[in-house]
Image (cartoon, rainbow, N blue to C red):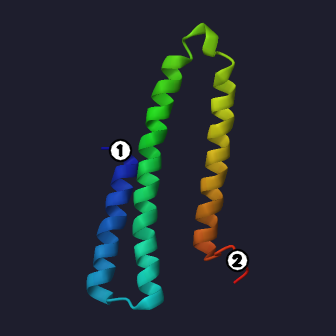
Amino acid sequence: MTMIDDLEREVDLFTVEVLTRRQPLAADLRRVISALKAANDLERIGDLSRNICKRTMALSRAPAMGSAMGTVARMGHLVQEMIRNILDAYIAQDCGNGG
């Protein structure tokens, strides 16, 4: 079990607590469900990232793959930036539609 798995589990437990103790309605319920889904998606991204890292390390040992490693690194940075933007928008409750 990894740190990201632990964090997802923590979000799961917190959302169950919120649902049972506070019984949120409408907008609050949507926020709780969104947080639960986001945690699941982030955990999946973490798992896939770990697999990509393992494959990249193995492929980097192949002589013909040396130049491709820079491309993989650039893609990784782009993905990190995209995820950061998504999480920032979530925190700011910015739907991106001007409202």
Which residue occupies 47% across, 78% down?
A: 31
In x, y percent, where is residue 47?
41, 43
Label pair 1/2, CB-CB below 8 angstroms? no
49 w.r.t. 63: above or below: below
Check disc 1 and report its element: helix, strand or loop.
Answer: loop
- Could you classify mark 2 by the number of other residues whose Cα lies within 10 Å: few (under 14), some (14-19), or many (20 or more)? few
Q: Which residue is mark 1?
A: 2
Dot 1 or dot 2, earlier in sequence:
1
The quadrant in which residue 98 appears is: bottom right
Which residue occupies 45% across, 72% down?
A: 34
The quadrant in which residue 93 appears is: bottom right
Q: Quadrant of the N terminus?
A: top left
Point out the residue furthest to the top here. 63
26 w.r.t. 98: above or below: below
In x, y percent, where is residue 69?
64, 24
- On the picture, is 53 further left or further right than 88? left
Which residue occupies 45% across, 81% down?
A: 30
- Separation of disc 1 and disc 2 at Cα? 36 Å
The quadrant in which residue 8 appears is: bottom left
Q: Quadrant of the C terminus?
A: bottom right
Give residue 47's mark. none
